[in-house]
Amino acid sequence: MSIEHVLEQIKQADIVKRYGRVNRSVGLLIESKGPEANIGDVCYIYTDRSKRDYVKAEVVGFQDQHVLLMPYEQTNMIGPDSLVESSNRSLTVEVGEQLIGRVLNGLGEPIDHQNIPSGLEPYGVESEPPNPLNRPPIDEIVSTGIKAIDNCVTVGRGQRMGIFAGSGVGKSTLLGMLAKNSDAEVNVFALLGERGREVREFIEHELGEEGLKRSIIVVATSDQPALQRIKGAYTATAISEYFRDQGYHVNLMMDSLTRIAMAQRELGLASGEPPTTKGYTPSVFALLPSF
Ligand SMILES: Nc1ncnc2c1ncn2[C@@H]1O[C@H](COP(=O)(O)OP(=O)(O)OP(=O)(O)O)[C@@H](O)[C@H]1O
Ligand SMILES: [Mg+2]
């Protein structure tokens, strides 16, 4: 690289950090004046003057020159004029084989009180779906380890499948059995919108130590903000895609898609979308095919 080129780059470099300021907060939404950011960018809303503590939020829209942000975490500490800084990039998760056997939150951060694994690679949470012509046809049978399913509703490798039943019928138990007994090398399990007490129950009883050894669990319980519950679904999908790219056979399971749709409805209504069928906003129907 020539010295002229470097000098030119220095001249053009933007060395001023630009901040925005919070000017309104209604329900789940935080409105700020600035900073310059694109939809999907992660922003930090500082909760103290020394800029040490912050709440992570995502740009979900714009209105009258204002940026609409939605936080990933609880927001008690944000006040008028809090500083907002854009990271100018969308959410990424840190992935790697070291994550196998771990429990993560909706943003992909370990929550199981063990050390943070090192040597992980950043991976974009929202990646483009593959070209449909690059997808191999489904021609190989997967053994789920549950005879009733293998016999009556045989599943193929690469297939998507849904379990629909009333509450308390045994869906979560069945998913746990699939995780424990199927012939996949890695299970990625997203527990989204579940009750907090069900999580340990699921990990310890349904999945067990044996199942956990080849699983990664993404947890965003019903008490987490709607955005984190939705991101949990994306995080789990991104982690599965990473392992798929490494050549593993991956089983991605989500419990439950209904609660993700409800979280997206919460988000959509808060950001001003019109309600349609059963109050679900149009973005819910756009979201579901992406998983
Ligand atoms: N095959 C089975 N035989 C007997 N009991 C079962 C069976 N499967 C599940 N159960 C029991 O049924 C209860 C509810 O199961 P589970 O939590 O899996 O239901 P669910 O459909 O996921 O419910 P929810 O809709 O509330 O999430 C549990 O106590 C579980 O032990
Ligand atoms: Mg359940």
Image (cartoon, rainbow, N blue to C red):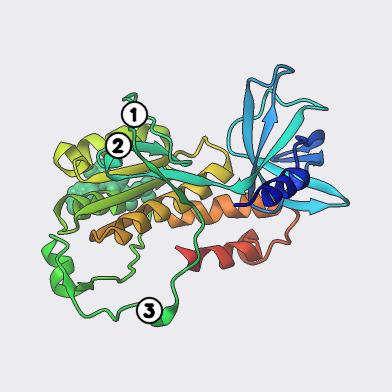
Q: Quadrant of residue 51?
A: top right
Q: CA distance from mark 3 to mark 2?
A: 31 Å
Q: Residue at x 75, y 37 (%)?
A: 15
Quick one: label 1 or label 3, which is nearer the N terminus?
1
Q: Amino acid at mark 3?
A: Asn
Label 3 Cα crowd, 10 Å radius (few <14 / some 14-19 / many 20+): few
Q: CA distance from mark 2 to mark 1?
A: 7 Å
Quick one: label 2 or label 1, which is nearer the N terminus?
2
Nearer to me, 143 or 62: 62
Q: Which residue is mark 2?
A: 102
Q: Residue at x 11, y 65 (%)?
A: 147
Mark 1 CB lies closer than 8 A to ligand 2:
no
* 192 shown above or below 129: above
Please identify the quadrant where the C terminus is shown: bottom left
Q: Amino acid at mark 1?
A: Asp
- The answer to whether the residues at label 2 and label 1 have Cβ atoms under 8 Å apart is yes
Mark 3 residue element:
helix
Q: Position of residue 1 (x, y in %)?
A: 59, 52
